[in-house]
Image (cartoon, grey):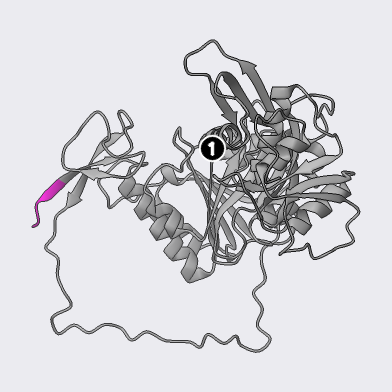
Amino acid sequence: MAKAQKNYVCTACGSVSSRWAGKCDACHEWNTITEEIVEASVPKGLSGKQKGRVIDFIDLKNEKGRTYPRLQTRINEFDRVTGGGIVPGAAILIGGDPGIGKSTILLQSVCALTNNNVNCVYISGEESTDQIRMRANRLGLGDSAVKLASATNVRDIIESVKSAPEKVQLLVIDSIQTMYVDSIDSAPGTVTQVRTSAQEIIRMAKSLDISVIFVGHVTKDGQIAGPRVLEHLVDTVLYFEGDRSHQFRILRAVKNRFGPTDEIGVFEMAEQGLIEVANPSALFLSQRHEDAAGSAVLAALEGTRPILVEVQALVAPSSLASPRRAVLGWDHNRLAMIVAVLETRCRISLSSHDIFLNIAGGIRISEPAADVAVAAALISALSNLPLPADTVFFGEIGLAGEVRQVSQPDLRLKESSKLGFEKATIPNLSKKKPANKNLPIDAQEISHVKQLAKMLGANIQQTEEGF
């Protein structure tokens, strides 16, 4: 019999070491390394008399008349993020901070699917069935025919799903970190247990054409806890973002084999659960003070959806040797780059000021098209001059100060016009005109950040050559 070996695995990043340590050398987290027993075995090749099973091959070409219908929840924001609905046999992983609303949105989704005659099973390893019923009654979903169970043994779950009187079409596992395989000698939540549990459930789901949704815990850095291979095993990875003290929630697709990535769905947390927001742009701008300096409207693009958000900047003189740079909802390093470009290319002094930047509404913007809006907000805050209330901004800024083109400017301008904006400051589109040239919006094209500074009345201490 092979001798058992001990490995020490970090529960935060999944790195393996041969000895225990208080701090992980890979992710630098403290008290995350746990001991796991691994059966040692000698690797064997394919030599010998035993033959493999012949695999049946099928043509890639679709059969005539065959369709692949998706499971649609009729919750438009959820269906949008999944690419138009849940594909039968797909594995979906949804992660988010504790209390952000993961279980709530899933309970609402499976109840909506059950009302559309889809056989759904909700298995929780964290709550009892009575606790799930209490939450369903609070959300007004107590009359739904969703099958509930409280279990953590993967072998029992797979056998129960296979032997169900009616074929299960959707299986929800809340959460994957509570599941365990009884043949593995390690605690639930460890790297080996999470990986093996997910593999066994996905294998069963693929063979029976059952859609499965896993709920995953996240680390303090916002990444899904457990091995990184967990995100590679599934077809779709969704993140539920937002501040628990804020009413808005953002469901974002970071991986989707059956739809666009970076697609977002916007929800509002209310007493009766999560309510989808059909027009998030109007909601994000509803509390904007148009006469406030440092406020710029960004026409962003999240997935296939154009969305307008407010970029807020505050610039104040600092008495510190290293002035503060605080950012919410945007990349801290990109703010440092924009500040350096404004100082170097436009002679706008910001090095002796504290800078605070916020994307209002609790949403996080990751695309570089926000550069021009951030630069406009910084210049407005520094000069204490409000920006035109009817103008939107978008464009990428390079290190030389050039303003680069961004994707789908026509969609951004259409959304801006729909919400009543009449002007836009955008990159030079001489080589790439919008598809619709009759947009009722006045687009001011710029090719360099100096043009933006001059347009906003900033005091540039250099000649106007090159404008």
At a point 49% along the width and 64% down the height, the residue shown is 205
Can you give x and y, in whole percent of width and height, for residue 15 in the image?
28, 44
- In percent of the image, x 83 and y 54: which residue is there? 414
Based on the picture, tell me whether residue 167 belongs to the magenta stretch: no
Most distant residue in the top direction: 319
- Which of 96 and 334 lies nearest the eye of the viewer? 334
Give x and y (percent) for residue 99.
Answer: 58, 32
The C terminus sits in image quarter: top right
Asked whether residue 121 is in view, the answer is yes
Q: Nearer the viewer, residue 18 or 150?
A: 18
- Left/right placement of residue 17 relative to residue 280 reads left
Q: Three-letter amino acid code at disc 1?
A: Met
Q: Main secondary structure of the magenta part?
A: loop
How many numbered marks are there? 1
Q: Is residue 67 above or below residue 104?
A: below
Q: Is residue 174 visible?
A: no
Is 184 left, or right, of 151 in this rendering?
Answer: left
Q: Is residue 209 above or below residue 156?
A: below
Region rendered in magenta: 1-5
Residue 158, percent from left and from top: 44, 59
Circle 1 Cα neighbour tier, 10 Å, few/some/many (<14 / 14–19 / ≥20): some
- Quarter of the picture containing the N terminus is bottom left
Where residue 259 appears, x then y in whole percent? Answer: 62, 63
Q: In front here: 335 or 224?
A: 335
State the SS at label 1: helix
Near-viewer residue (133 or 113): 113
| Residue labelled with disc 1 | 337
Q: Residue at x 56, y 19 (%)?
A: 352
